[in-house]
Image (cartoon, rainbow, N blue to C red):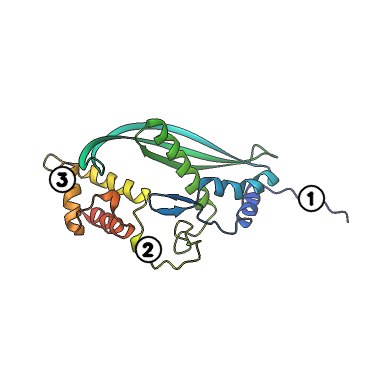
């Protein structure tokens, strides 16, 4: 019997793509820690996507933006300065398409959020993070101790973990939680100072370690 190439449906192709992923290494630095870049994730997956003729289409809907005013410490001028960030949020749909049979589609609801001092950068960074984490989560890349964001690729043991600076993701979450607690009595900076007191530090949050940031998040999320 002559061999015929078996045509795979979309779900079978996605399984084959997942099977082709071995592991990711931290190849990008930022905010005091190393993490997996979106380009590395795409590069590893794209080869198999091309081979199997699978497309991934991002759709952005219900986009909104707002400004967030706060104070930050200027180390050079040694004083607090006013700062405004743009926060862009949007609902998304990631659509997998079997190019051999375009009617075969899988639509996955998702969300994106970006915060930067420029609205275009906020939108772009939100899309970049969204794409990376969508692919990592969709294909089931481990997110506990084997999380690529926690993997040490330098060959050193992670006994210095507590000295690592807080990640951008942690700082954004703390900022958002503080903002949600602002009221007539306590402004953002008041809450920031109270949080520093609870942590037993006089450092502003951009200088906190990852461990301090985790503790701060636990404090804020436990508030009723």
Return the disc, 2 or 1, that comes first in the chain's sequence. Answer: 1
Return the disc, 3 or 2, that comes first in the chain's sequence. Answer: 2
Q: Is residue 70 above or below residue 30?
A: above
How many marks can you see? 3
Taking the spot 60% from the left edge, 59% from the top edge, the residue there is 22
In the foreground, 105 or 199: 199
Give the labeled residue for mark 3: 190
Give the labeled residue for mark 2: 161
Point out which mark residue 64 bears: none
Q: Residues within 10 Å of mark 3 (few under 14, many from 20)?
A: few
Q: Quadrant of residue 84?
A: top left
| Element class at badge 3 | helix
Residue found farthest to the left = 185
Nearer the observer: mark 2 or 1; the answer is 2
Q: Is residue 118 above or below residue 222?
A: above
Q: Residues within 10 Å of mark 1 (few under 14, many from 20)?
A: few
| Element class at badge 1 | loop
User: Residue 51 at x, y = what percent?
Assistant: 70, 46
Q: Residues within 10 Å of mark 2 (few under 14, many from 20)?
A: few
From the image, which quarter does the N terminus lie in? bottom right
Taking the spot 17% from the left edge, 49% from the top edge, the residue there is 193
Give the labeled residue for mark 1: 5
Q: CA distance from mark 3 to mark 2?
A: 29 Å
């Amino acid at each position: 019997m002559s061999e015929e190439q078996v045509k795979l449906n979309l779900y079978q192709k996605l399984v084959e793509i997942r099977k082709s992923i071995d592991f990711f290494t931290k190849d990008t630095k930022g905010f005091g820690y190393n993490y997996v870049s979106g380009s590395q994730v795409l590069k590893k997956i794209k080869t198999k996507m091309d081979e199997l003729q699978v497309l991934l289409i991002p759709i952005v809907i219900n986009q909104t933006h707002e400004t967030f005013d706060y104070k930050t410490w200027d180390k050079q001028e040694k004083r607090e300065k006013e700062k405004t960030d743009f926060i862009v949020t949007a609902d998304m749909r990631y659509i997998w398409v079997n190019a051999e049979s375009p009617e075969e589609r899988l639509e996955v609801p998702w969300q994106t959020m970006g915060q930067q001092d420029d609205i275009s950068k906020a939108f772009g960074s939100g899309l970049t993070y969204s794409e990376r984490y969508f692919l990592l989560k969709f294909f089931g890349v481990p997110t506990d101790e084997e999380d690529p964001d926690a993997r040490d690729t330098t060959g050193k043991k992670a006994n210095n973990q507590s000295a690592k600076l807080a990640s951008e993701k942690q700082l954004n979450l703390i900022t958002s939680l503080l903002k949600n607690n602002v009221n007539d009595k306590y402004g953002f900076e008041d809450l920031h100072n109270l949080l520093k007191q609870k942590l037993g530090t006089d450092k502003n949050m951009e200088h906190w370690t990852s461990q301090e940031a985790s503790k701060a998040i636990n404090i804020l999320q436990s508030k009723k």
